[in-house]
Image (cartoon, rainbow, N blue to C red):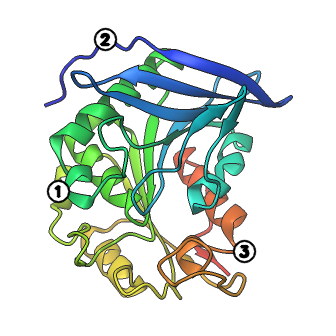
Amino acid sequence: MIARINVTVMFLLVTMSSATAQEIVTLPTRDGVTQSFLLLTPAPNEPAAVAVLFPGSAGNFRLRNENGEIKFAPGNFLVRARSTFVDGGVAVAIVDTPSDQPQGMDDRFRLGDKHAADIGAVVVALKKRFNNAPVFLIGTSRGSVSAAATAGALGAGVSGVALTSTVYLAARSGPGLSGFDYSKVVAPVLIVHHVDDGCRYTPYSEARKLAEARRYPLITVKGGLPATSDACEAFSPHGYLGKEPETATAIVYWILKKPYRENID
């Protein structure tokens, strides 16, 4: 159950390009807690949809303002692919960690009621701002834990969920989605995974198994550039290195109910 929240929004607006505006939005969620996100809006038209993006790892992409400029860590797959969403007519909200989780979010927080309340406030604010446009939750790696769990909590409040490079297996750092009940998610679900994902907690075989069991559509990605990071980090097949535009475009087309590529190679 998500409490009704007064969404008083504070923002800093700067122009990223003639076709895109970006701003930091901070809103109150739980008692004494605020949630910030980077909002990118295609201009001049109203967006066809809104994608709430959840980066992986601890979820802290260090969103901040320095001397009038918006700064953040740009390495995550979804952060790198943000312009592809915007170019497709989809507004983007990249979620940072809430104010009471400055060191980042673990899986148990991502799976819990407090996180659901924070993201519920984000969804309410985005729907209010964009004339009730459909909102989709997109997560990558541990960000997929947030996308799945909050979608389950928000029910019909979201229009779809895309899970990319998902943590399907438990690790010492947390359970991931190993015990998650996908029947809680009433919105359509899309699975996206690189066939050569070498992270031991995110094997492609688990993505395919889930897609077959739940009859979820699956986008399979192959190829790309040689990895320059650990197998569980963003600059590898786990982060669709060299395949970011094609992968993000397929997700955008799914959001917009257009024909999309199920196999990217």
* Sequence-first tag of 3 and 2: 2
User: Which residue type does callout 3 highlight?
Assistant: Gly
Front residue (pair 246, 241): 241
Q: Can you tell which of label 1 and label 2 is closer to the viewer?
A: 2
Kindly identify which residue carries mark 3. 242
CA distance for labels 1 and 2: 30 Å
Kindly identify which residue carries mark 1. 183
Apparent side of residue 117 relative to residue 249 in the rendered image (left or right):
left
Residue 137 visible in the current orientation: yes
Quadrant location, the N terminus: top left
Task: Determine whether the residue tagged by mark 3 lies in a helix, strand or loop.
Answer: loop
User: Which residue type does callout 2 highlight?
Assistant: Asn
Residue furthest to the front: 67
Mark 2, Cα crowd under 10 Å, few <14 / some 14-19 / many 20+, is few
Q: Can you tell which of label 3 and label 2 is closer to the viewer?
A: 2
* Sequence-first tag of 1 and 2: 2
Task: Determine whether the residue tagged by mark 2 lies in a helix, strand or loop.
Answer: loop
Kindly identify which residue carries mark 2. 6
Mark 3, Cα crowd under 10 Å, few <14 / some 14-19 / many 20+, is some
